[in-house]
Amino acid sequence: MNFIKRAILSMKARKGRTILQLFIFTIVCVLILSGFTIQSAANKASELARQELGGDVTLSVDREKQMEAQQKESSSSSSSTTTERRMFESTPVAVAAAKKLAELDHVAGYNLYSNTQALASGFEPIASSSDTSQSDDSTSSAQQQGPGGDSSDTNRPQMVQADLSVSGVLDSATATKFKAGTDKLVSGKAITESDVGKNVVMIEKTLAEENDLKVGDKIKIQSSDEATTVELTIQGIYETTDAGSDAAANFSFLNPYNTIYVPYTVANTIKGSDAKDTVDSAIYFMDDAANISAFEKAAKKVTAVDWDTFKLDANDATYQQMIGPINNVAAFSKNVVYIVSIAGALILGLLVMMQIRERKYEMGVLLAIGEKRSKLVGQFLVEILVVAILSFGIAAVSSHYVAQVVGNQLLTQQNATASESTSTTTNQRGPGGNGGPGGGGPGFGSSLTANTAEIKSLDIQVSLEDMLKMGGIGVGIAFISVLLPSILVLRMNPKTILTKQE
């Protein structure tokens, strides 16, 4: 009798065993296919997020190298009788050098930042509750005299505490707070590259309302030493949801309502002639976060930048926060595939082994009448492969729904875990950990990350590739579950099998 026909008859005769194998094999196939589809959906979501978000790379002074150089210079100076303290020095980036990097491949856009502080002239800033620097003439006089009230040095420029943060940018729309959604333009126009060299400004809505200012009005600001005055035309009004830091209660210029956006050339004018054609930092927006390394490698070859003084910092925190939960889900589903494949092979192998042991007499008779051992193994393979094919069909229909529910549930849990981690990190940094003044500089990456929308669901689709991978693993499980038990039994002599059966 043909071994394939014998396999079909055997399956009909042992319906209970066949149904049990079908049930187990179907569960294994559904879980394996669900794992593959979740991985595929996670990879697609990760790819889409990477292309949409890209990544930011910041060019700025290397503070660590700067401090190390000062330390070496101080320790090597044997002629000095006093120990010189290390100090913070501002080293600007040349605009020409920053633009050279913007011409490299993978740069989708860039922004330049030049931040400073200024005094309001002819209009009132939003007062901070504990800021008494402008409260009376005697206080101002004492500040101008300096600590101890010594005003003997009449030639020294007198500094007055600033009450405005001036955020000089190339493009306000891509400034960090605007990208994060913390700041939003409500009327007028944003600052763009075409405004470079123009005396225009964007002010906060509350500041505008308190001073009855509107788009088209002019305001004046002064440098902190009152030596430079600039008249600006209001071309835009924005609204902020930034709560500010605790320090804003003591210093008006840290109050988010007192932040004004100007072209970086205006900020440089306030800083003085030494700041001409320079910026504090430059941020480059990558077309794909995967290209950050390639950009950094190419940038290091640009000789216009002194790499002993400046450095590149990759900021893909937004991308990492968004895809972190997705990657965790993909890793989990990958582990599920491994575990289920191994467990499925072991369980089915055990069932087949029990089945073969129960059918020793049948095999002994077949071997005694001259049936080949390979056909006996083939019969067991046909039985398990028929079960496998039925399981593949059931899995193809049902795994989409299983994967959709399981994948989204896992993603929800991972998003909740990531949110808790972000909140803990923010709390450890303390309130108002937004970086320096100006509100638009690169120090505000945490704000951007916190406002990034989560990917809350996966687009689960069962593809032909996933089906083929599941089928390959399923067939492999079928072979393993049959071959190993068969080897143990088929090594026995037919006479020994029949004798033991008797």
Image (cartoon, helix red, strand yellow):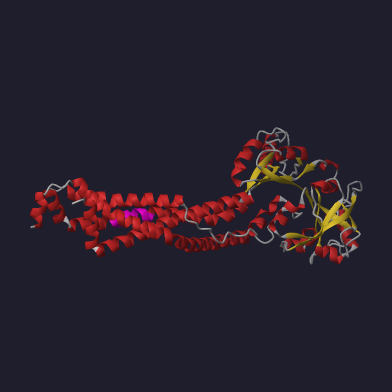
Judge from the rendering whether residue 398 lies leftward or rightward of residue 186; answer left or right.
left
The range drawn in magenta is 339-348
**Residue 33 image-quadrant placement:** bottom left
**Residue 87 image-quadrant placement:** top right
Can residue 445 be seen here? The reply is: yes
Q: Position of residue 321 (x, y in %)?
A: 59, 55
Judge from the rendering whether residue 467 lies leftward or rightward of residue 214; answer left or right.
left
Q: Is residue 19 magenta?
A: no
Q: Position of residue 196 (x, y in %)?
A: 83, 46
Q: Position of residue 481 (x, y in %)?
A: 28, 52
Q: Nearer the viewer, residue 239 or 437?
A: 239
Numbered disc total: 0
Q: Position of residue 436 (x, y in %)?
A: 73, 53
Residue for point 66% across, 56% down: 448
Judge from the rendering whether residue 211 lies leftward or rightward of residue 297; answer left or right.
right
Q: Nearer the viewer, residue 232 or 407?
A: 407
